[in-house]
Image (tube, rainbow, N blue to C red):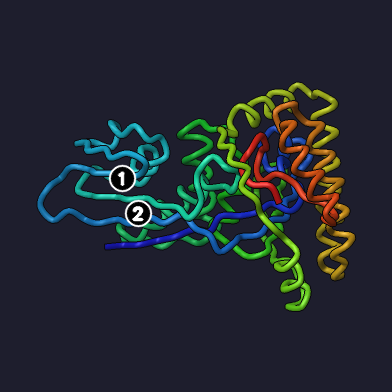
């Protein structure tokens, strides 16, 4: 049996600039952190039977991968040229549809398991790019490259995305003292709201390609703030980091009415009144985890 896992992530700056509609014109920048919560894949080779059984929130048994209903499982198996004789199970430490990048982590962990099954070797760059291709191209989901690269690389990581889609990955240089203080300064709260990010991201893609000024300006602003957040962390200025997060969240909310809700704004303000300097919703917005 093969077991793989890929970390979930919390974005700290530049979120949304990893979508093609933005980086193809302006280049993207993401600062993000892999965390100690994971998506797990277990893959077992069937010795006699040639069917495929997949287990996630439901169980499917099919004769051919084309018949699988789960789009990421189906397209991953087709991408890897798997025809049958496998049992695959998926688990996660955190619910899906909560802004933690679980679909990207799922795809990276699944492709890593299939790669091991086929005795193939892929670099982390190749694994991230193939996972992005499966989810964004084959499955046709409106996603950027952020989630797949963080799932493949983990850590406190910067992604510079060129207009041709090339991603340069670098580790953020911070001291152990700052890293420990950062860990102790961040709280994640589950709002209890699960939502699909695709509607928000599809609208962002459409608005950005049309040059909708409010959306493009918001993305420019969060990219600029992403670089400032990087600088604040490198210099160990955590109070400045918190204040910049507040600016980042304010800029992000201008992108779409679907980014926040009245109850989320109320919870955010309660946190600020209790001493928090800043924060944001994870992922595209609308629910999930509030930092």
Q: Estimate the x, y position of residue 279 in percent, counting from the top left.
A: 77, 50
Q: Estimate the x, y position of residue 41 in percent, counting from the top left.
A: 38, 55
| Mark nearer the viewer, 2 or 1 | 1
Residue placed at 86% from the left, 52% from the top? 244
Query: Which quadrant would residue 42 be assigned to in this image?
Result: bottom left
Query: Where does label 1 land, which residue?
Result: 55
Query: Where does label 2 land, which residue?
Result: 114
Query: Which quadrant would residue 218 be assigned to in this image?
Result: top right
Left or right of 25 on screen, residue 201: left
Q: Estimate the x, y position of residue 74 in percent, counting from the top left.
A: 35, 37
**Quadrant location, the N terminus:** bottom left
Q: Nearer the viewer, residue 225 or 118?
A: 225
Mark sitting on residue 24: none
Element carrying mark 1: strand
Element carrying mark 2: helix
Q: CA distance from mark 2 to mark 1?
A: 15 Å
Q: Nearer the viewer, residue 84 or 101?
A: 101
Q: Nearer the viewer, residue 181 or 1?
A: 181
């Amino acid at each position: 049996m093969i077991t793989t896992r890929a970390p979930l992530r919390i974005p700290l700056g530049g979120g949304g600039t990893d979508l093609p509609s933005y980086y193809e014109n302006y280049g993207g920048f993401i600062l993000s952190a892999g965390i100690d919560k994971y998506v797990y894949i277990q893959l077992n080779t069937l010795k006699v039977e040639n069917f495929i059984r997949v287990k996630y929130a439901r169980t499917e048994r099919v004769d051919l991968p084309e018949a699988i209903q789960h789009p990421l499982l189906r397209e991953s198996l087709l991408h890897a040229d798997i025809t049958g004789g496998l049992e695959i199970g998926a688990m996660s430490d955190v619910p899906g549809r909560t802004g933690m990048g679980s679909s990207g982590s799922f795809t990276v962990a699944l492709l890593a398991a299939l790669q091991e099954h086929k005795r193939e070797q892929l670099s982390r760059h190749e694994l991230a790019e193939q996972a992005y291709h499966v989810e964004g191209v084959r499955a046709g989901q409106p996603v950027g490259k952020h989630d797949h690269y963080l799932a493949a690389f983990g850590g406190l990581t910067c992604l510079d995305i060129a207009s041709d889609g090339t991603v340069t990955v670098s580790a953020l240089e911070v001291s152990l003292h700052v890293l420990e203080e950062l860990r102790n300064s961040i709280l994640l709260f589950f709002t209890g709201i699960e939502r699909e990010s695709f509607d928000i991201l599809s609208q962002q893609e459409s608005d950005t390609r049309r040059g909708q000024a409010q959306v493009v300006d918001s993305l420019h602003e969060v990219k600029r703030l992403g670089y400032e957040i990087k600088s604040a962390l490198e210099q160990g200025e955590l109070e400045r980091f918190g204040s910049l997060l507040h600016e980042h969240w304010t800029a992000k909310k201008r992108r779409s009415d679907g980014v926040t809700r009245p109850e989320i704004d109320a919870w955010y303000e309660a946190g600020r009144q209790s001493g928090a300097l800043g924060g944001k919703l994870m992922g595209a917005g609308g629910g999930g985890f509030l930092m």
